[in-house]
Image (cartoon, grey):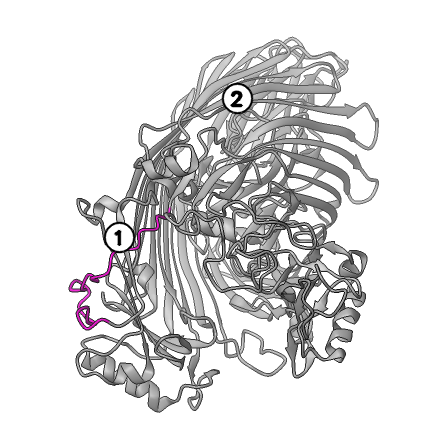
Amino acid sequence: MTHTNRVRLSKLSLGLIVALAAAPVFAQSTSSGIGGRVVGADGAPVAGAEVTITHVESGTVSRAVTDANGRYAARGLRVGGPYSVTINKAGAGTSSKNEVYLPLDQVAEVDAQLKNDVSTLEAVTVVGASSADVFQASNKGLSTTVSQRDLQNNPSPSRSIQDVARLDPRVVITDRARGEISALGQNSRFNNVTVDAVGVNDPFGLEANGLPTIGTPISVDTIEEYNISTANYAVTNRRSVGANINAVTKSGTNEFHGSAYYAFRNRNNMIGESPEGNKFQGLGREWTGGVTLGGPLIKDKLFFFANYEESHASLGSDFGPSDSSATNKIAGITQAQLDAVIARAKELGLIPGTREASSDLEGKRALVKIDWNINDDHRASFRYQRSREDEPIVTNGNGNNSFALSSYRYNKQRNTDNYVLNLYDDWSDSFSTETSLSYQKYDQTRSALAQQPQVGIAFGGTAASPQGPFINLGEDQFTHYNVLGVKTLNGFFAGIWYADDHTIKAGFDFQRDEYYNLFGRTQFGAYTFTYANFLAGGANPVYSQYDLYRPKAGYTLDGIAAEWTLSQKGFFVEDNWQVNDSLSVQYGFRYDVASTNDKPLYNPTFEQAFGFRNDATINGSRVIQPRFSFNYNFPTEKYQTQLRGGIGLFQGNSLGVWLTNPYQNDGLRVDTYSVRTYNPAVPFKSDPFGQVTPTVAANSQQAVDSLDPAFKQPTVWKASLAFDRELPWWGTVFSAEWQHLSVKDAIYYKNLNIGAPNGRLPDGRYNYYRTLGQAPVSNDARVNQDRRFAQAVTLLTNSGKGSADNISLTLRKPFADNWAASLGVSYGRATEVNPGTSSQASSNFSNNVWINPNEDVASDSNYAIDRRINASITWQHNFFGNYATAISAFYDGHTGQPYSWVFSNDANGDSYSQRDLVYIPNRGDVVFQAGTPQSVIDQFYAYIDSDDYLRQHKGEIATRNASRSPWINQIDLSIRQEIPGFFKGAKGELRIDVFNFANLLNDKWGREERIGFPFVRNLAGYNGVCGATVTATCTAGSAGKYIYTLPTTNGNYAPGQYIIYDDKAVSRWSILVTARYTF
């Protein structure tokens, strides 16, 4: 059976030589296309020629007929190949081309001249960055195609989507351990990752990498091809503030093909040691193994492809007592004391666990795909994808000055099921449709060793004020009840009409998300004891602190969950117009509207205090997104040259968790109890369900999150302009690409309960302390805070500020003559008002820095990488018969993480420490706390003079994210050797991927130095403002000056220091060995 596609095409002038075809219907497409022009022996167009396009391996056939201008096109074709193209016209001749390969979301150009005979033309391979891929009318935006050959050749030391995304010069992995992918300096959660045109993003927004798993959500062995785009102007393109990363999965063919593979590494001899000789403790051994199989169910008709994969990683964290064998020894706690704590916990009925923390991260992924050629004009594809991930969270609880027993650690389970149906239909010669329907079910839960209270044992401080170091045991209080479920239904329909020079596309899409989030923290109680009190007291030890959360009267545990539904609908129309032989333009718009019938619980006290209701939702939010793009192909005879560009408005999605916060935190459904003096009437209980409700009144301060009634989803204007030129050497293509992004609506968090300021400090910033210029206090500093509410009462609203610019210069030499190479240099900048780093609204506010809180000021983005160089090279040779040996290298060098210079404490009295941008003084601008040695003061000023940014901005308040951590260099290497298989058509492969190869050569190379999250660096401490009274600190003439304290180490000035960022061994070399057998 064949699949027929007869298309009526536009009327182009006779002088057109290169086939110019419209982009495929899907912006995140699942298919490819072929188009071209057929002329006769005299050069005149041949009308009525039949074009037969055959996917060789599946037997799938598509047909087209040339129009009066000799033009033809076929779309909705499988990605990859090989294809054969045969063009025939009685009396004119026959022409054939073989070995045609099609990239994702592109239209290959196959022209022919019929000379009254039968001819076979050279192969056309359209992959990667070849000139045939670049110089097309459909290439209007900015994108990078990663073909199957690219996936095979490029180093992939983590077998992840991050290894692929970094191949685009505008996309940077800003946090290699967490897998954060940033495009154009935008939040890593603002990307849109799709597989077969259906989103595989984190449906709620808890994961920093923007994916539903911490690893890859789908096996890399199932992917046929990727397309990475930062500017795709098709109106079908949605959720596009950052990058679109689209993958299409493999399909079965008429022959059975499969593979089995196993990849592994361990810390003993495959992960480097630190310069101090320490082995990496965060990983013991990891491995991934899987199989693929594809083939026919019915020849030429029905095909299948399937994959199953498992991955395991032994994770660990080696903290322990000072006299133990632990790598990280905690001073102040002995093994004998740990043994006593464990024994005592058991006496009290707790299940403390052990110090050993090694546990396995387990991932299981499965995929089944069915392709069906229904009849000559209709094709369908169905995919089921399943992911199961069980991640152990190894935490100490109180930073590095403590350690936790295994009962305190927990596992996070993430389960995803995806069902996807795609339909491709040709209804006539001039009209076709594409339809997609998908359903995703995502569940995330937590589990611990046992349900029990959280218990912290303090070995410092007093009973009234317990201090570290700590031993933590029991169930982490944030795990007591923590359940998330999201059900997502997606639909897409588009029709495409061919009308002369115009290709008109129109349709609609929708997404429906059903959210359920139960965050029942501290339902089993949380206790803090001193070590002495924990061991004493018989069955009722004396605690120092006791916290308990309970549903208010009239509410059940399920009643405090956030449960609501969000629907988003989009409508679009677009015209692709072939203006003349060289110019193609695309213009249209899409209209998006959000709706929900669910509201947060109304809090009248909130409205009384802040002047508006807390139950506003995103219902009715809508935006019209006009878009325009063009491609101009210069009529050159030898080396192709083109200009392309566009402009358009793009809406993204706010994270589900951000929109859910008001449903979760209304201040009305949960009672919180905080006991700070031991009460024998409220004794310690080890029974999680037998906790005693304190006799004191519940905390009356309400924590409320709210949404601006006029809130809009993140929306940005994007514009781009690019110039491409084919060079005389090896088919190399030079591209110069510029992109600009301007914010229309960005997220912006306010804390409504800061209160009115109380005067100004010496540098002009507002003061919120009760007394202007007073020394800092630890809590409750705000003079005008509404005491009916908690410190953080948030509002999620919009800012119209923020922008980004990027210029990329690239050279790409496609794979030919056994080698390929690329070189890219990019320069960029990006600004934002709020980085959106977190899931909780209060954290999104507090994990920012400011001069004055709540200010709507755009500064350098947390995710901005202003300079980047990336380069790759692949060389292949057959040393042993037909078995290839390949060596590939990839270099990624870029500027480090931006950070801000701040006061080390709360300088303005807004109750947030290390969030106030510091004043950078000239000598004499400030005074120093009495007793500060002059040598330390001199070192302080010398340090300012030695730092480029500080020196140039003396006498000013530091700007957010104005400084940068050191440059980062990373070189990855891959060596691949094919070996004979056991029977004809089979072969084996041994592969070695070396991550951070430079670190293997020298253990001081390839290391990443950065400032820890939230990327603030202490310059000095605030200790008040001098008044008129002369004191030991404030001498005559110093009134109105800041009083600074200076951080020291061993008697020397020591500002906040860089750390060697080594999570998941990103600052060490590591080796991944893969064995693969294919048939």
Q: In the rendered view, does 675 fall on the left or right side of 1059?
A: left
| Residue 610 placement (x, y as % from top left) | 43, 37
Give SS at disc 2: strand
| Residue 698 placement (x, y as % from top left) | 26, 55
Three-letter code, disc 2? Arg
| Residue 521 placement (x, y as % from top left) | 30, 57
Label 1 CA crowd tier, 10 Å (few <14, some 14–19, many 20+) = some
Q: Which of 379 and 420 is in front in this view?
A: 420
Q: Outermost residue, front direction?
A: 1029
Q: Viewer-nearest of labels 2 and 1?
A: 1
Q: In the rendered view, does 199 fall on the left or right side of 1057?
A: left
Tell me, for residue 671, which label it has, or none: 1
Q: Where on the picture, by quarter, is residue 37?
A: top right
Q: In this view, does 231 lie above or below 967?
A: above
**Quarter of the image with the N terminus in it:** top left
- Which span is picked out in magenta? 679-703
Q: In the rendered view, does 865 fall on the left or right side of 298?
A: right
